[in-house]
Image (cartoon, helix red, strand yellow):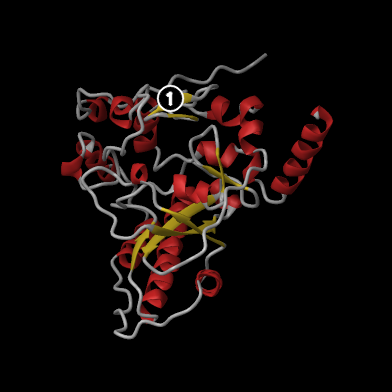
Amino acid sequence: MRKTKPKFIPKPEQMALWPDISGNKVNGLGETEVRQPTPIYWQKPELTPFGPIMGYYKSVQPPDKKLIEIRQREHDFAHQEISPKSNIRKENTPEKWTELVKEVGLKNNGDVVGITKMKPEWVIESFEVPYETVIMSGVSMNFDELKEAPGIISAREVSRQYGRAQQVSKAIASWIHEQGWNAVSYGGSNHVPMLLIPPAIECGFGELGKHGSLINNKYGSAFRLGAVVTDMPLDLDSKKIFGADEFCMNCKACEAACPPDAISSSKKMVRGVDKWYVDFDKCLPYFTESIGCGICLAVCPWSRPGVADNLIKKLAKKRQKDI
């Protein structure tokens, strides 16, 4: 007999701070026209009606010494200055610059580096991004710690890897400055002026999962992102379709595990794109009271070490049979 999940009921003190507007409306759920996203979370509180909820989230964080230290390091990485730009602009072919940029990212603790061209609908309203070329970096998470979600252990790992994403992005931006080209590092967590998942998908990092996060063909959903924008001439990478979207159509792991039932079994139209979408108004209250949650990423079959390769092979065989 299937167990019934206990119904999650947010605390009254949190809900008293909620705005009258739906977060799904702010996100553009149901809209058929492509547009820029509106600031909604992880931005300056005055930019979003959910600013008070961000304050509540911070107020209910546990006084865990190690978590506080890790989050402080993440904060320090985010505010670390990059190297000043050289007055001498070095020249090279886009192919060679691309090779060198990726080498820098991988040597500075990144797991994946990719390049794509900025699209206007990735830039969050009220922000400007100065350069059109986007260098995405990806860092993997420790699955043994992620699978403890929600809780202190997984929260530490999330912040730890966002800090690593900051380090990778800063290293790439600093190196580009040393070559005499312009670059801005956006790290991968608070106050980033652009969406990170869409460019990561465009440059071949993976596919969007039912849980609303990226699924990488090696690290699954145990993955965090950082970004750099630059005017350095670089070659662009391409999307990689390996079957994650197809897999999500039939898999219900994250959908079934989500305590507030925020994950839908079907795609939704969001700002002119038919995509997997997590109900903001259901997800955020649980996220806020659960140290950031992360259950959906932990239960995703793709996240388990060594599983992605086997899933890709099985999906390829299935497609071959269907031909």
Q: Where is residue 76 in the image (x, y as percent from the top left)?
A: 31, 67
- Above/below status of 176 relative to 247: below
Foreground residue, 255 or 277? 277
Horizontally, is 213 left or right of 24 in the view? right
Residue drawn at the location 80% of the way across and 28% of the way down: 322
How many marks the image carries: the answer is 1
Of the 4 image quadrants, the one containing the N terminus is top right
Residue nearest the observer in this picture, 59 or 39:
39
Q: Which residue lies furthest to the right in this view?
A: 321
* 157 in relation to 234, above or below: above
Q: In this view, does 313 lie above or below 323?
A: below
Residue type of the residue flagged with mark 1: Met
Task: Indicate the secondary structure of the residue bearing disc 1.
Answer: strand
* Quadrant of the image occupied by residue 41: top left
Give the residue displayed 35% in from the left and 67% down from the top: 77
Q: Percent position (x, y) of residue 150?
A: 47, 40
Q: Residue at x 33, y 60 (%)?
A: 131
Q: In which quarter of the image is residue 84?
A: bottom left
The furthest residue to the left: 46
Residue 305 at x, y = what percent? 68, 51
What x and y, as percent, mark residue 225? 46, 54
Question: What residue occupies the far bottom of the structure in this picture?
Answer: 88
Q: Residue furthest top?
A: 1
* Category of crowding for the residue at label 1, using alpha-carbon neighbours closer than 10 angstroms: few (below 14), some (14–19), many (at least 20): some
Residue picked out by circle 1: 269
